[in-house]
Amino acid sequence: MKYILLSLLSSALLIYSFPHTGSFTPFVFIGFIPLLLLRAELLQYNKKPIILGIWSYLTFLIWNIGCTWWVANASMSGAILAFTVNALLMTLVFGCWSWLDRKMTSGWSFWLLIPLWLLFEFGHHRWDLSWPWLSLGNYFANRTGWIQWYEWTGTLGGSAWVLFLNLFVFKIILHFQANTLSRKYFIGLAALIIIPIVASQILLSFANYTISKRRFLKAVVLQPNVDPYKEKFAADASNEAFTDSILGMANRHVNAQTDLVMGPETALPLSFLEDRIYTFEFGRKLQDQISKWPQANLLIGASTVKLFDSKQSAASTPIPNENQWYESYNTALLLCKKNDPQYAHKSKLVPGVELVPFSAYLPFLSAIAIENGGTSGTLGVEKTPKILEITKQFEIDKFKHQSDHKIALAPIICYESIYGDFVRQQVQKGAQLLCVITNDGWWGDTPGYKQHFAMARLRAIETRRWVLRSANTGTSGSIDPSGKIVKKTSYWTKTAFSQVIELRTEKTFYTKHGDWIAGLSISWILLACSNILMYKANQKRKSNA
């Protein structure tokens, strides 16, 4: 009974501290404590490691379900895959650390949970079963005043903070039980909590400061509020009808100063060939409207297709009786006055929904794809993160002479906004503005769309860029470089708004160097293991002397 209570308590603390499933963030600093106490008791009574594995798995499974249960609204199979696999991976990491600590019995080995977990999160962002929603650094998405230093560390820094405090508090509990607790532990605990928050507040005062020549862009952000289940992919749906609706919304807000109009993911949901967009009535309507706007460009989500003469990737599908292949994409489409259409394809695909995991190595898996939102199997992707460009005239001197300048946009499609490293690569390539287009209506009125919006705030801090977010429904809005929400729409509402943002060109430490903490974690593990092995070798030599 005691074990199950400790397991449930750990899960409850981690659930209640997560954004929009409780949002009482301080609980995350003690969320692992009950599980660590459970482990200590099992070790005390020499229980088999499999017993710890069972209780750990239960803890992590309940945690996953409690924070992300809403995934089942879109795909029950995908949800079960996410819950069970993610919990298993967490259990393996925790079990690996427990085994190392038990075998090495060193003060060094106790702290190895931190680099091991950080490497798990780093790797989990970069494979076919990626599901980074519960990365510990995401817990501070609603507490941006605490983590302005993400511009240096990314979310891995927040994960390290969480783990370090959990282990430190656990050490305090052990010293209390052994009656060896001293005041220095409380001083250390206070420092671990206060110093990062104070440092964050100092950085916050500089967050919106820019040394570049100040340049601005005015955008109109649309939220069409189309039901993804009943309207968007219905039998009588048409891109022409959606185009009329989108342009009608936009025209009520576009004026002579508008530079960019943003529509959501798959706003044009019915697939079309990219190189034949203007052969369709909706393509001609869009370009005709853009030609009438004084200077506005249109960034919008679409479902697109490309034809190839040979197989390009695991996403390539042969056309029966023809010597051609096609690939389908979840696409960000940029239409400008003078330039050809620009396309960026979603690269971070949702496992099971847009991606059949490991189908590049096991092609037969494509046959068991989960169908959702009009797509099935594996979608095509960009080989590297991509940016799109528009042109705007800026004054270049005191005489108000104007010159054309390229403005680089980061097209971020839905799930991609959870990946800090993906977004920072777009900024490294020159993106001056983060444009998130998404369709959060799949999840219904649940914590899912709120969490998704909140996590975009982390990308703003990491890169010190403005974020514009156009959601089909859910929450659209604008976020400044400090992670502050400037504008935010209501759920299940057809609406639009205008926002003036500052274009930024400076690059943060995190933008330049990425997840350097992962490299530090590897060094930490190697150093700790070498010290432990050297210590044991010296002890053995002394005992044989």
Image (cartoon, rainbow, N blue to C red):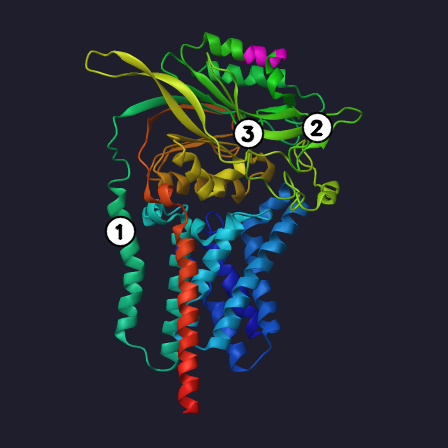
Where is the N terminus found, in terms of image quarters?
Answer: bottom right
Q: Residues within 10 Å of mark 3 (few under 14, many from 20)?
A: many
- The x, y position of residue 8, in whole percent, is 54, 64
**Secondary structure at numbered mark 1:** helix
Q: Is residue 430 toward the left or the right of residue 18 in the image?
A: left
Residue 341 is left or right of residue 320, and the answer is left
Which sits earlier in the primary sequence, circle 2 or circle 3?
A: 3
Q: Is residue 472 magenta?
A: no
Compared with residue 518, is residue 99 higher up or lower down, i.e. above or below? Answer: below
Which residue is labeled 2 in the image? 325
Element at badge 3?
A: loop
Residue type of the residue flagged with mark 2: Trp
Secondary structure at badge 2 equals strand
Image quadrant of residue 229?
top right
Q: Is residue 241 visible?
A: no
The answer to whether residue 490 shows anywhere in this view is yes
2 or 1: tag closer to the N-terminus: 1
The quarter holding residue 350 reads top right
Q: Residue at x 26, y 47 (%)?
A: 201
Q: Main secondary structure of the magenta part?
A: helix
**Pointer 2 and pointer 1: residues touching (CB < 8 Å)?**
no
Q: Quadrant of the C terminus?
A: bottom left
- Which mark, by number, is residue 199? 1
Residue 89: horizontal and vertical position, in percent? 57, 58
Where residue 140 appears, as percent x and y from the top left, is 40, 49
Q: Which residues are magenta?
A: 279-286
Of mark 3 and mark 1, the one earlier in the sequence is 1
Residue count near mark 1 (Cα–Cα under 10 Å), binned few <14, some 14–19, many ≥20: some
Tag shown at residue 265: 3
- Label 2 to label 1, Cα distance in Å? 54 Å
Alpha carbons under labels 2 and 3: distance apart: 25 Å
Front disc: 2 or 1: 2
